[in-house]
């Protein structure tokens, strides 16, 4: 029996209000050969972190995964990206503009969004760039701790063409310790151009 391309979507997850886009995304995923392994947690609020992020293709396949699941996962982008006609296309599929010049910093903007919503999933690439980095950005840990929201790890692996849902972790006040444990989980996985730690 073949493994399903996408796992079932849990009832507590925030949903996309569309049937066409999930159908199209699943069709494109089927043609690409990529699969999503593991189970989604049945939680109304969640931060999802994916790595290694070494190519623009990560965003393409990741977007197909999220839309194919029919889950409304918010992804932060610069406010300028959402200006004009492009914003009309990107807002319905979960991209949210970040105002870096606002009085609230990005962490506090996201904490406020979590407080205002009954259901919200937020996707973040902790490396913050496609290039090799020594240190991951700790913003996701600060958001998770302040908003009291768990973190789901997502491992990207190009050799096997899979995105794998890993364990759910909880941020503590020891961000350095949390980061070391989380990064260790990503060690076996290989991106298009490198692994998560080099």
Image (cartoon, rainbow, N blue to C red):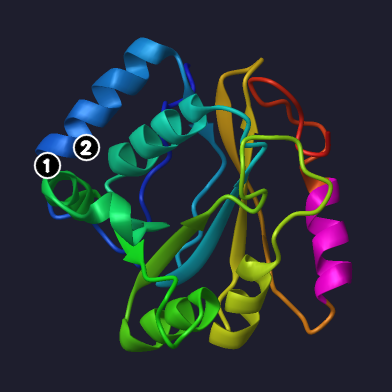
Q: Is residue 19 left or right of residue 150?
A: left
SS of the residue under disc 2: helix
Instruction: Magenta stretch: give its range.
Output: 175-184
SS of the residue under disc 1: loop
What mark, if any, has residue 19 been given in the picture?
Answer: 1
What secondary structure is the magenta-colored segment mainly?
helix
Q: Which residue is mark 2?
A: 22
Q: Is residue 11 visible?
A: no
* Residue 165 location (% of width, % of height): 59, 45
* Residue 3 location (% of width, % of height): 49, 23
Task: Determine which quarter of the picture holds residue 29.
Answer: top left
Label 2 and label 1: CA atoms lie apart by 6 Å
Q: Residues within 10 Å of mark 2 (few under 14, many from 20)?
A: many
Q: Quadrant of the C terminus?
A: top right
- Find the residue positioned furthest to the front: 101
Q: Residues within 10 Å of mark 1 (few under 14, many from 20)?
A: few
Q: Determine whether 25 is above or below 138 in the image.
A: above
Task: Determine which quarter of the picture holds residue 168.
Answer: bottom right
Q: Is residue 75 left or right of residue 155?
A: left
Q: Determine whether 190 is above or below 83 in the image.
A: above
Task: Determine which quarter of the picture holds residue 130.
Answer: top right
Q: Is residue 97 left or right of residue 103?
A: left
70 within the magenta span: no
* Residue 172 location (% of width, % of height): 77, 80
* Residue 92 location (% of width, % of height): 17, 53
Residue that appears at 49% across and 28% down? 56
Contact, mark 2 vs mark 1 (Cβ under 8 Å): yes
Residue that appears at 65% across and 41% down? 51
């Amino acid at each position: 029996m073949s493994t399903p391309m996408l796992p079932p979507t849990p009832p507590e997850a925030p949903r996309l209000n569309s049937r066409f886009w999930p159908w199209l995304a699943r069709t494109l995923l089927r043609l690409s050969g990529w699969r999503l392994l593991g189970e989604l947690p049945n939680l109304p609020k969640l931060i999802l972190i994916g790595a290694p992020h070494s190519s623009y293709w990560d965003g393409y396949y990741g977007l197909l995964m999220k839309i194919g699941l029919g889950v409304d996962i918010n992804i932060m982008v610069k406010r300028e990206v959402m200006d004009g006609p492009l914003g009309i296309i990107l807002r319905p599929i979960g991209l949210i503009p970040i105002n870096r010049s606002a009085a609230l910093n990005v962490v506090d903007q996201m904490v406020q969004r979590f407080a205002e919503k009954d259901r919200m999933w937020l996707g973040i690439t902790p490396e913050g760039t496609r290039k090799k980095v020594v240190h991951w950005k700790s913003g996701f840990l600060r958001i998770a701790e302040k908003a009291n929201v768990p973190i789901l790890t997502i491992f990207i692996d190009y050799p096997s063409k899979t995105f794998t849902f890993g364990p759910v972790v909880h941020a503590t006040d020891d961000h350095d310790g949390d980061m070391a444990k989380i990064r260790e989980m990503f060690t076996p996985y290989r991106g298009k151009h490198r692994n998560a730690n080099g």
